[in-house]
Image: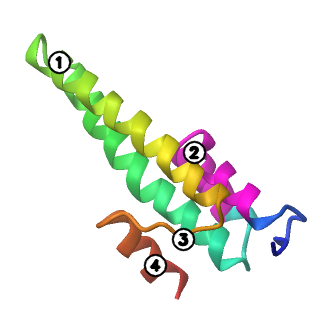
Amino acid sequence: MAKTSMGLEENIAGVLCYVLGWITGIVFLILEKENKFVRFHAWQSVATFLPLWVIWWIFMWIPFIGWMISWLIVILIVILWLVLMFKAYQGEMYKLPIAGDFAEKQIK
């Protein structure tokens, strides 16, 4: 497994891009300038979890039906979070349909 400019193995750095969602994605975009694997996962983390977080936050302000929808969003976030961390740990550049395409364009 290749090392990053920070001295981490790239699969570990890829996992860390997802640990705190879009926040750690931004941190790794700032810290890692060279490794395309890590930058892909950092961009995908931001492009996936920032919009979901904003949507969740909006629905939290809508009584009853919004609260129910926000729970579905939380379930989706947890599933995506686990899958993406697992795939990054395996060394895969697992690409989600929209966020993955965006992330791929950013690293080219």
Mark 1 = which residue?
68
> Could you say where residue 93 lies in the image, as x and y percent from the top left?
54, 70
Horizontal arrangement in the rendering, residue 58 relative to residue 87 (left or right): left
> Residue 95 occupies which quadrant of the picture?
bottom left
Mark 4 = which residue?
104
Front: mark 1 or 3: 3
**Under tag 3, what secondary structure?**
loop
> Could you say where residue 76 lies in the image, as x and y percent from the top left?
32, 37
Magenta-colored span: 11-29
Residue type indicated by callout 2? Ile
User: Closer to the camera, 89 or 66?
Assistant: 89
Front: mark 3 or 2: 3
Name above or below for residue 7 compared with residue 49: below
Magenta run includes residue 28? yes
- Estimate the spatial distance between the alpha carbons at disc 1 and disc 4, rounded to whole Å: 33 Å
Dot 3 or dot 4: first in sequence order is: 3
Mark 1 Cα-neighbour bin, 10 Å: few <14, some 14–19, many ≥20: few
Residue type indicated by callout 3? Met
- Estimate the spatial distance between the alpha carbons at disc 2 and disc 1, rounded to whole Å: 25 Å
